[in-house]
Amino acid sequence: MWTRRTALALGLAVSTMKSRAMTLEDMKTQLLGDWGSLAPELRPSGQKNPDGSLKPFHLRREFRCLAADRFELLVTNCADPLGRVPLARILIRGHMLWRGEHPIAPGAQKVDFIADEAYEVTPLLQGFADVLNQVAAQGYATWTVGATQSIFGKNFVPFGLVEGRHFKEYDLVHLSHGLLFWGARHVDGRGFDTEENRPTNLQIPLQRLQAPSTPP
């Protein structure tokens, strides 16, 4: 029989669930599936203009979280703010290492992303291919538009990669309102290359594209 007491009890239960901080297992479960950029995104690139200001860096992200703490990240770099002139496509595959709670928001977690499975680059504009043929020719075939090359485990000067060392970023992950947040880039262009450089703010989020219907 439905009573005011029953309704009150259900209301309290729902309220408790909403107020409960997300656990690590909650996070891992809800993270599974495909995510993508809401719009073209802006980053400080770390490279400087002649006047000393940081050059802008435009991109789109496609992120897939898989079982066993595996991930795939596809980044498309663009030459313009609206993302209409793609420069290059970068594919990273690897593992996520969970390092504990991050104080930026309730339920946020420190996460290290390690590209220990694959790292590939595909030039999408002739000008970018020409640059790679100047600064990243040794150890690679001629860079051509649309042709993918693996830079996994190799020296790759444009990205600061060193032979025999996996690319790694000390980042964060936060889920809120159905959106996936990572760490915001430092305004001075520093990368997330050490624990001390782990981000302390949230970046523009990714939206859910598709949740897995079956375990990956």
Image (cartoon, rainbow, N blue to C red):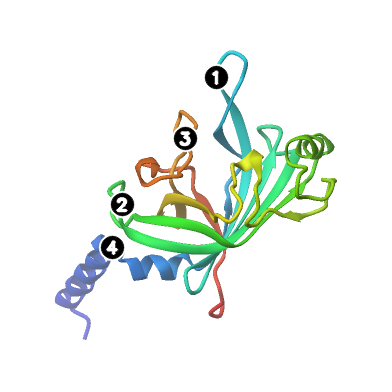
The residue under label 2 is 102
Q: Amino acid at mark 2?
A: His
Where is residue 87? Give x, y as percent.
74, 40
Label 3 crowd (10 A; few <14 / some 14-19 / many >=20): some
Q: Is residue 216 above or below residue 32?
A: below
Residue displayed at 58% across by 13% down: 51
Q: Are marks 4 and 1 in contact (CB under 8 Å)?
A: no
The residue under label 1 is 53
- Between the residue at mark 2 and the residue at mark 3, the CA separation in whole angstroms equals 19 Å
| Residue 171 visible to an observer of this rendering | yes
Residue displayed at 57% across by 47% down: 38
Task: State the mark number for residue 18.
Answer: 4
Helix or strand or loop: what does disc 2 sit on?
Answer: loop
The residue under label 3 is 190
Quadrant of res 78 = top right
The extreme top residue here reads 51
Where is residue 67? Give x, y as percent.
50, 74
Task: Say which of 87 and 7 sits in front.
Answer: 87
Q: Earlier in the sequence, mark 2 or mark 3?
A: 2
Task: State the mark number for residue 112.
Answer: none
From the viewer's perspective, tell me whether residue 144 is left or right of residue 152. Answer: right
Q: Earlier in the sequence, mark 1 or mark 2?
A: 1
From the viewer's perspective, tell me whether residue 194 is left or right of residue 95. Answer: left
Q: Amino acid at mark 4?
A: Lys
Helix or strand or loop: what does disc 3 sit on?
Answer: loop
